Image (cartoon, rainbow, N blue to C red):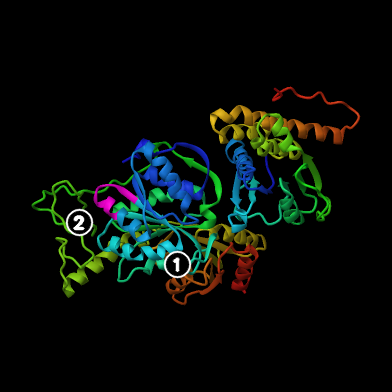
Amino acid sequence: MHADPRGVLTGVHFLDGDHACCEGTLAAGARFAAGYPITPSTEVVERFAWRIPTVGGVFIQMEDELAASITMQGAVWGGAKAFTVTSGPGFSLMMEHIGYAAVTETPCVFVNVQRGGPSTGLPTLPAQADMMQAKWGSHGDYGIIALCPNSPQECFDLTITGFNLAEEFRVPVMLMLDECVGHMTEKVVIPEPDQIEITPRRYTKKTPEEFRLFEPREDKVPDMVKAGDGYHFHVTGLTHDERGYPSMTVDTQDKMVNRLQDKLKPFTNGRAIFEAADLEDAEVVVVSYGITSRVAQRAIEMARAKGIKVGKFRLITAWPFPEQHIRDIAAKVKALVVPELNLGQMVREVERSAGGAAKVIGVPHAGGTVHNPEVILKAIEEAVR
Amino acid sequence: MRRLLSEIRIAGFGGQGVILAASVIGKAVAIFEGGYSTMTQSFGPEARGGSSSAQVILSSDPILYPYVTSPDILVVMSQEAYTRFTPQLKPGGILIMENELVQPGQVAAPEGVHVFGVPATRLAEELGRKVVLNIVMVGFFGAVTNLVDPDALRKAVEDSVPPAMQKLNLAAFDKGFQYGAELIHRMTEPETELVPAQEGDE
């Protein structure tokens, strides 16, 4: 299915990442957003609030992040594609409802423009320290998808991808921007609507009598219904059976929780989104994501100029973590260098996936700015030694 | 045209249109010249207390590192911006200032810096609207740096303001550009008289 032309601002623009993300939501078909605006993510919903009356839809500024993140889910069950936008402090408050979206398999998008933390931290400065929180922040076992754009263009493109993946797998999708990417202005090309692929929501074709709310298809993902279409359904955060009714048995729990993770398995490695270069002859590979991947690229070029055989692996899907790809690379190289704007988060995943086959060297940074490329270069030089 | 990486910082008071000026330059290169540009802004609390600063990187290749640390070109529209940012200029770089708002000499510029001044606020007032001083600065920047195709800059000005404001802003751009072109002409050929262009004069 192609994008609804009403939401697509076709043309060549000079936009910051936040605004590009907003245009991505509109192109993806989002017609509802609820938010409690917070720096540095405010521009996403500010633009949405300005754009949505002409496109046809609703933006509600809520009383807080808990309200925003659950109102969004009500809109989804009412038939809309919907999202919410926040940054660290708000993301922390949304954790409860990320779990709720996961267990109720509500296809929705959480945009997190990361700033320095913990707590109120650095409102106007970048960090990438919410990466583990995106995966593990809510209690219990569940699966999510997290995408990391490194430019305003990708803020547009990956927002559409995020909405599509949310529909395909019925999971909350996290768009993990950072302040630098969100507030950086670059050229953004928005294609014609018929060039933009949109994954429509898969509504059940069964009759209300035969329909079961969480009966999975072969791909382990159940079909949706829309409130008001004549289906009786019960959506609950309690452990539930395929009918959607609470069933607090060991068996139901086992089935439900496993399916919440298993349905993402095809995406984990086979369809992982990443960017790789110069892996063939590499002795060292730099694994990075988001804004750090651009700074890392400069360090890679500096190292290559010095004759060091260094490759790159850029995570675009950070979650599910593409462990098989890292395992394969680790088997062939001396070391993996992992710069990130936190004190060591995704580096642990790299380490786990490498399984001791290669050295893993983190290049931590507490946030507030990006790495000095020289620091990453130094880590690369030490890694080849 | 192959363009070397150029780093520009534009700074002044909040309300002078610092961000728009930077955006016009970035847009001219990224959209109307087919190159690459990345613009970032200072969002710190200090940006709210009256000072405003934006950075643009121009290049013919994709830009990796997003921030400007030591600009090739500094455009200042306030004394505070001049004092704060002049020492960060690259040696041999270009300093462009609003010369009725900035009193130079209080800080030492790095070696070999070329200085160009324009009374942008007064020129904007001559057009009837002080608010277009930022676009006068962009025009002047275009003429004295010769870094961006003037047509691309003009198109970017047109593309960046509401339709009702296009005529005024283009006049502001032309006025700044002409002032810069005349200044350069006087500096390079002091003996000959340049016939002033009529474009933009109303």
Q: Element at badge 1?
A: helix
Which residue is disc 2 drawn over? A217
The span shown in magenta is A73-82
Q: Residue furthest left?
A: A209
What residue is pinned by disc 1? A326
Considering depth in this image, is A126 or A195 the residue closer to the camera?
A: A126
Q: Badge 2 sits on which subunit? A: A
Determine whether, in the image, residue A203 is placed left or right of residue B73. Answer: left
Residue B17 rendering spot, x and y as whole percentages: 62, 42
Tag 1 subunit? A
Q: Tell me, for residue A133, which label it has, or none.
A: none
Q: Is residue B91 left or right of residue A48?
A: right
Q: The N terminus of chain A lies in which quarter of the figure?
A: top left
Amino acid type indicated by mark 1: Ile
Among all residues in the image, which is located at the extreme right? B191
**A208 vs A259: above or below:** above
Bin the neighbour count of mark 2 within 10 Å (Cα to Cα): few under 14, some 14-19, many 20 and up: few
Residue drawn at point x = 54 percent, y = 32 percent: B162
**Front residue of this view, candidates A231 and A155:** A231
On whether residue B129 falls in the magenta region, the answer is: no
Query: What is the x, y in percent for residue A256?
Result: 22, 67
Q: Earlier in the sequence, mark 1 or mark 2?
A: 2
Relative to residue B23, is residue A189 drawn left or right?
left
- Label 1 and label 2: CA atoms lie apart by 31 Å
Helix, strand or loop for disc 2: loop
